[in-house]
């Protein structure tokens, strides 16, 4: 179930998503570049609210968000279909289960079949392992006759079998790491000093 932060994503004029690895790079005198992973690969979101809406419409939202502040985690969904919409050809994606053993891939166990062409998943689809699990993006297309899904990062869950949540139904657990100031101007209008920045809870 989403929290007060959800309204930020529902009304944002811009949303930026960063899920790249954290790395450190050094360059030698001869120009050789060395790259080292710093560990961790979390989702980060930057969302900007519009300036000009009525402050009176935001008062209750602001209060609920300030309770969470930058210390408590909340949950959000990105429901815009052009961002998280399912791209494959399966007719029923709500009853699938997968099994995880090790690494960054899972095996489809049941419920994700019934097509003889096309794709079960396309690169960029977002999936969640169980209702309280982490969210991953599909790293490469999964053809209709393939039962392995490769994700964008190592899987954080313990080995086992999980239900698969797909597309706009996935839920991220996040903390707000940058909370902008707001200003009331004109008559009952609100503006923000910058974007909200959220980081996935590890």
Image (cartoon, helix red, strand yellow):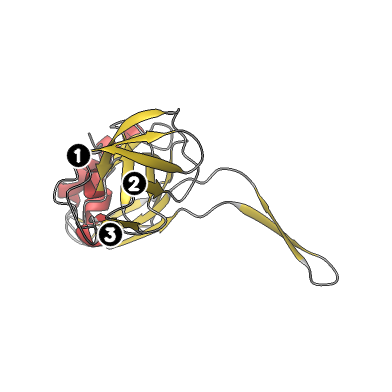
State which mark lies toward you, 2 or 1: 2
Judging depth in this view, the residue of 188 and 117 nearest the camera is 117
Judging depth in this view, the residue of 17 and 195 nearest the camera is 17
Hey, which quadrant is residue 169 in on the image? Answer: top left
Q: Is residue 8 above or below residue 163?
A: below
Along the polypeptide, which appears first: circle 3 or circle 2?
A: 3
Q: Which residue is mark 1?
A: 60
Sort mark 3 into few (<14), some (14-19) or many (20+) by Cα contacts within 10 Å.
some
Q: Is residue 143 left or right of residue 80?
A: right
Q: Which residue is mark 2?
A: 147
Q: Are marks 2 and 1 in contact (CB under 8 Å)?
A: no
Camera sees residue 151: yes
Per the image, label 2 sits on a secondary structure element best described as loop
Q: Is residue 130 left or right of residue 100?
A: left
Judging depth in this view, the residue of 86 and 182 nearest the camera is 86
Q: Position of residue 3 (x, y in %)?
A: 25, 36
| Mark 3 vs mark 2, CA separation in Å | 25 Å
State which mark lies toward you, 3 or 2: 2
Q: Is residue 119 left or right of residue 73?
A: left
Sort mark 2 into few (<14), some (14-19) or many (20+) by Cα contacts within 10 Å.
some
Q: Which residue is mark 3?
A: 83
Which mark identifies residue 6? none
Per the image, label 3 sits on a secondary structure element best described as helix
- Residue shown at 37% from the left, 52% from the top: 138
Q: Tell which residue pokes out farthest to the right in this image.
A: 29
């Amino acid at each position: 179930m989403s929290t007060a932060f959800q309204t930020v994503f529902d009304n944002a004029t811009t949303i930026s998503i960063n899920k790249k690895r954290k790395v450190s790079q050094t360059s030698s005198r001869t120009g050789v570049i060395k790259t080292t992973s710093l560990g961790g690969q979390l989702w980060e979101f930057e969302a900007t609210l519009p300036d000009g809406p009525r402050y009176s419409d935001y008062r209750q939202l602001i209060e609920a968000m300030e309770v969470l502040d930058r210390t408590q985690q909340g949950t959000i969904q990105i429901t815009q279909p052009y961002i998280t919409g399912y791209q494959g050809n399966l007719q029923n994606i709500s009853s699938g289960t997968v099994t995880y053993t090790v690494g960054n891939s899972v095996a489809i166990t049941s419920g994700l079949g019934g097509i003889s062409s096309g794709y079960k998943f396309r690169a960029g689809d977002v999936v969640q392992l169980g209702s309280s699990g982490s969210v991953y993006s599909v790293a490469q297309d999964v053809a209709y006759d393939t039962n392995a899904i490769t994700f964008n990062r190592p899987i954080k869950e313990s080995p086992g079998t999980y239900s698969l949540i797909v597309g706009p139904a996935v839920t991220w657990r996040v903390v707000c790491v940058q909370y902008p100031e707001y200003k009331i101007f004109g008559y009952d209008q609100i503006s923000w000093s910058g974007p909200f920045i959220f980081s996935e809870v590890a």
